[in-house]
Image: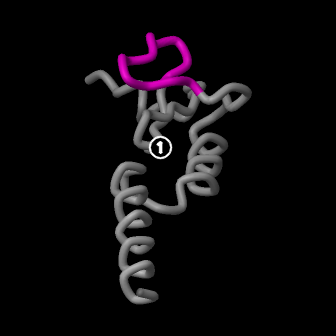
Amino acid sequence: MSTSCFDREDETFIVLVNHEAQYSIWPHWKAVPGGWTAVEGVKGDKKTVLDYVEAQWTDMRPKSLRDWMAAQQQTDNASASA
């Protein structure tokens, strides 16, 4: 029975981020998938990279949604001030 590289304790991972500021961990030897960029300087065992992701990715909403919500809030504030 084969084990996924994501389940191996001795695997080395990198952290990826996409244009929506969403994070993923990825085996260091696999090609980075389209739409994702490796976070420079972050590489290690699964716990190390997951700790990094947990510290960085504090808002699970996609960046486009956060931006839209912020713009709506500004519009609402401007309307309330008028």
Please, which residue is most extreme toward the right here?
41
Task: Tell me: residue 52, above or below residue 80.
Answer: above
**Residue, x 36% and y 49% (percent of image)?**
64
**Residue, x 45% and y 13% (percent of image)?**
30
- Which range is magenta? 27-38
Which of 9 and 40 lies nearest the eye of the viewer? 40
Q: Main secondary structure of the magenta part?
A: loop
Q: Quadrant of residue 36?
A: top left
Q: Secondary structure at mark 1?
A: loop
Q: Quadrant of residue 5?
A: top left
Magenta stretch encompasses residue 30: yes
Q: Position of residue 41 (x, y in %)?
A: 73, 27
**Residue, x 43% and y 66% (percent of image)?**
70
Task: Tell me: residue 29, above or below residue 24.
Answer: above
Q: Quadrant of residue 14?
A: top right
Instruction: Give the class, few, some or many, for how many residues have Cα within 10 Å of label 1's Cα (few <14, many ≥20).
Output: some
Which of 37 and 64 lies nearest the eye of the viewer? 64
Task: Answer left or right for 66 relative to 48.
Answer: left
Magenta stretch encompasses residue 66: no
Q: Quadrant of the C terminus?
A: bottom left
Residue beneath disc 1: 21
